[in-house]
Image (cartoon, rainbow, N blue to C red):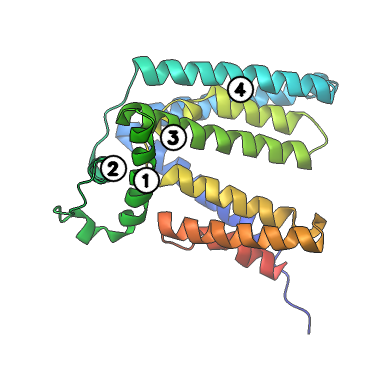
Amino acid sequence: MSKVRKPMLLPILLAIGLILGILSKLINFNTSLDSTAILLISGSIMLTWYLLAPCINRLTRQQIKWLLVLVLGLMLVLQILILTFLPDTIFHDPYRVLSQADKMAAGKLSWRTTYFWRYPNNVPITYLLALWLRLARWLTLNTNVALAILNILLLDTFICLVLYTLYQTHQGNTTLLGTLAFLTMTPFAYTYYLQVFYSDLPSMLVLLVILRTLLFWPRRSKRQRFGSGVLLCTAVLLGQLLKPNLIVLLPAWSFYWD
């Protein structure tokens, strides 16, 4: 008996989540002005790219590659300047995680705070961050520099992987360059994910790896599928440790029904 097919389930769920998130930000008085500005900028970028679509699609793949390198290089320079001259102060959960990880990296392995008894889900990310800070100490890097490097690595890997996925799956240039504009010309690459380390960005990166693994699975040979299967299991396990909920399992569930 054939399985029931549920087409477009994952995109519909993600679209509903995005719409609810946008509405909640617009309704919240404290963040409505910033959210409205981001929404207007994003809408302007989408409209501009739609109007310029014929010209953009005439660009060659080589020209697209050079444009990507140029824009991403400028983005990296701006990120370094922001981390250097506009550091952010963190509070609440990110601070608790960083504080405990910094102590562990210095050899103080006691967990005297009651925070992690109340929020045990943050223990894995604290331990993983402590390993990174321990490596940074071995390289004679201070905590701030180590954290900045980690944030840039995670964020820029996510951005490059998104763009590379679109480059592999879309023949036209408008989707790729429109996404490039959104990721590099809005606060996405320069504010929270760049300045604050927490479980959100690593979870997004893990989810992207899972999506890519499932997306390109039919194109793989049997030998390649073995490696992809190991990568998939590792990514899901890491995602569950970083943020123990079912969001990283949704792609696998949707793929099963396909």
Q: Position of residue 210 (x, y in %)?
A: 61, 54
Q: Residue at x 82, y 22 (%)?
A: 62
Which residue is label 1 attached to? 131
SS category of the residue bearing label 1? helix
Which residue is label 2 attached to? 105
Q: Position of residue 61 (x, y in %)?
A: 82, 26
Which residue is label 3 attached to? 150
Disc 1 to disc 4, C-alpha distance: 29 Å
Asked whether residue 243 is in view, the answer is: no
Label 4: few (<14), some (14–19) or many (≥20) C-alpha neighbours in 10 Å: some
Q: Are marks 2 and 3 in contact (CB under 8 Å)?
A: no
Q: Horizontally, is 131 left or right of 8 in the view?
A: left
Q: Nearer the viewer, mark 3 or mark 1?
A: 1
**Amino acid at pointer 2:** Ala
Q: Residue at x 69, y 23 (%)?
A: 68
Which label belongs to residue 72? Answer: 4
Q: Nearer the viewer, mark 2 or mark 4?
A: 2
Q: Are marks 1 and 2 in contact (CB under 8 Å)?
A: yes
